[in-house]
Amino acid sequence: MRPAVTAATVVAAGAVTVGTAFAVSGSTSVAPPVPAQRVGVVTASVGGPGTVVPSAQESSVIVNAVRSSALTSAVPPESYRVTGTVLARSDQSWAWVELVPVTDEVDRAEGVLRRGDSGWELIQIGSYEVGCGIVPSAVAADLDLECPSDQPGFDA
């Protein structure tokens, strides 16, 4: 089960647990890219039938996008590992990652990223319905996102 919470900014420093999700607000501001410390970077991924495992270099770029995002800016980078990185087979400009805690101060989360003209951007992070109503339906199927059937599709 891959749940999601609409997110734009982590609001608690150090302790980011609210219920079962990363604590987030609805801001759309994006932090400028910053050099990310390579703490706990895991580039190994397991691809399913609808996914493509990115190269180690691409995976590293995605990890840096997660760590430099406004969505994770209040979470110490040493408190989680980014792992499980996969790309959607139908549209490899979409990626899914798992944020695995390495301390008791944070919970597990998932993230959906999109590669645009300026590179990879973390679009949503959470633990409930991550990516639902945001990614195209073929991408949701590729990434095995668990979304309610009444979610509107992506129409950009």
Image (cartoon, helix red, strand yellow):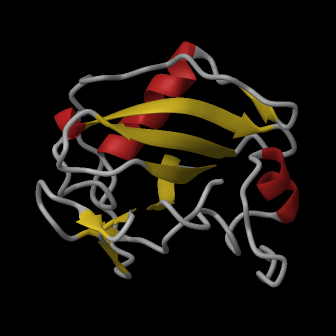
**Residue depicted at 41% across the width and 34% down the height:** 82
Q: Nearer the viewer, residue 89 or 110?
A: 110
Quadrant position of the C terminus in the picture: bottom right
How many discs appear?
0
Whether residue 119 sits left or right of residue 147 in the image: it is left
What is the x, y in percent for residue 102? 25, 33
Looking at the image, residue 17 lies above or below residue 55: below
The quadrant where residue 51 appears? top right
Q: Residue at the spot x=54%, y=41% of the render?
A: 97
Q: Position of residue 142 (x, y in %)?
A: 82, 46
Location of residue 113 in the rendering, given as x and y in whole percent from the top left corner: 56, 51
Of the pair 42 and 119, the residue shown nearer to us: 42
Judge from the rendering whether residue 93 lies leftward or rightward of residue 33; answer left or right. Answer: right
For image coordinates 70% across by 37% down, the residue present is: 87
Whether residue 15 sits left or right of residue 114 in the image: it is left
Q: Quadrant of residue 132?
A: bottom right
Q: Is residue 37 above or below residue 28?
A: above
User: 107 or 11, which lies in front?
Assistant: 107
Q: Give me the residue at 15% from left, 58% from top.
A: 15
Query: Where does residue 133 sit, x and y in percent of width and height?
Result: 70, 75
